[in-house]
Image (cartoon, rainbow, N blue to C red):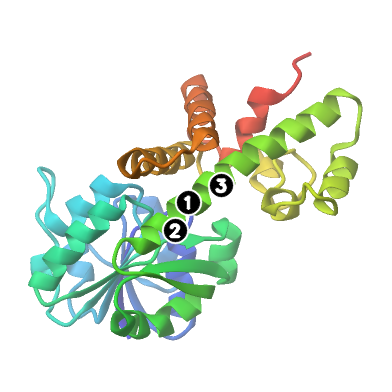
């Protein structure tokens, strides 16, 4: 297929590369010249603009930071014209950004009015999953649109869940990321407490991983440097999933909880902790760096 891929960050770039490796013709675009150069070195075509990228595309995949970026891309903003008029009728849009469900629904309505199919398909699995092609996709949209997207999603992920109609994928994602944020704070607290008492973080992590405290952070994404060689914690908290992105997702969860009158006290506390961590200057670091707030000093 001819695919336009817009958004080449830590997740988007490896996803686009995997589609290219699978034999699809991928024309990619990002506002960052460095991001474009990265995928160009892997053999992908680089477009001069988003409008250029979608010319002749059978599918458009976007992976952008937040709601305003997705809405601005497709529906236009003060900074750029709308992309939808440049996309051919019958094209499939797969938005894998993590944004508000209401934004997905707004863009979907505009796309439908223009004769363009749309699904929201946010992902979980981290940069490691993006590179390995083992992501989990949480899809909101019609059965027919999902089946059109499935051959592409299968080249980027190992698990595809149909959560419901448009926006349902986003709701599932914010529930997942709220839990992830809570788990990372709790895991960091437990490791910091053990280390403060003289325990080896590797030994403690393995004990908890194989006990009732086991979770994904202990399994694959340990927040303590040196425990997992390939985790961002062992690379100066570079790359991975940024603190500010986690803060954004926790904010989405709390906005949604307020809207539906759901009680999420731990989600609210996690958001406050990540907000303080960001204000302290760690917004660009991986979200596992929250352990720095909890470690004994001196």
How many marks the image carries: the answer is 3
Residue in the picture at 74% in, 55% down: 219
The residue to which callout 3 is attached is 179
Which label belongs to residue 175?
1
Query: Residue 7's image quarter?
Result: bottom left
Q: Is residue 199 above or below residue 68?
A: above
* Residue 113 in the figure: left or right of residue 2: left
The residue to which callout 2 is attached is 172
Residue in the picture at 31% in, 61% down: 167
Q: Is residue 264 above or below residue 93?
A: above
* Residue 262 in the figure: left or right of residue 27: right
Residue 235 pos. (x, y %):
67, 43
Q: In this rendering, does residue 277 appear at all?
A: yes
Q: In this rendering, does residue 8 appear at all?
A: no
Task: Pick the residue in front: 156 or 261.
Answer: 261
Task: Pick the residue in front: 203 or 213.
Answer: 213
């Amino acid at each position: 297929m001819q695919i336009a891929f817009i958004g080449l960050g830590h997740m988007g770039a490896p996803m686009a590369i995997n589609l290219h490796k699978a034999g699809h013709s991928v024309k990619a675009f990002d506002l960052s010249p460095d991001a474009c150069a990265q995928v160009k070195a892997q053999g992908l075509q680089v477009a001069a603009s988003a409008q250029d990228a979608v010319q002749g595309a059978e599918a458009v995949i976007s992976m952008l930071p937040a709601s305003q970026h997705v809405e601005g891309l497709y529906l236009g903003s003060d900074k750029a014209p709308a992309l939808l008029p440049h996309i051919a009728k019958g094209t499939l849009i797969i938005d894998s950004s993590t944004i508000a469900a209401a934004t997905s629904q707004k863009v979907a309505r505009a796309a439908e009015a223009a004769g363009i199919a749309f699904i929201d398909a946010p992902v979980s699995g981290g940069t490691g999953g993006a590179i390995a092609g083992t992501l989990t996709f949480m899809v909101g949209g019609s059965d027919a649109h999902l089946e059109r997207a499935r051959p592409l999603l299968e080249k980027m992920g190992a698990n595809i869940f149909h959560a419901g109609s448009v926006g349902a994928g986003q709701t599932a994602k914010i529930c997942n990321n709220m839990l992830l944020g809570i788990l990372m704070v709790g895991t960091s607290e437990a490791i910091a407490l053990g280390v403060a008492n003289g325990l080896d973080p590797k030994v403690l992590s393995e004990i908890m991983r194989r006990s009732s405290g086991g979770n994904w952070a202990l399994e694959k994404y340990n927040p303590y440097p040196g425990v997992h060689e390939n985790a961002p914690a062992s690379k100066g908290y570079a790359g991975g999933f940024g603190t500010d992105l986690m803060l954004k997702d926790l904010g989405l969860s709390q906005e949604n909880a307020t809207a539906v009158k759901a009680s999420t006290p731990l989600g609210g506390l996690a958001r406050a902790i990540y907000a303080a961590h960001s204000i302290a200057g760690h917004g660009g670091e991986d979200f596992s760096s929250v352990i720095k707030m909890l470690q004994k000093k001196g």
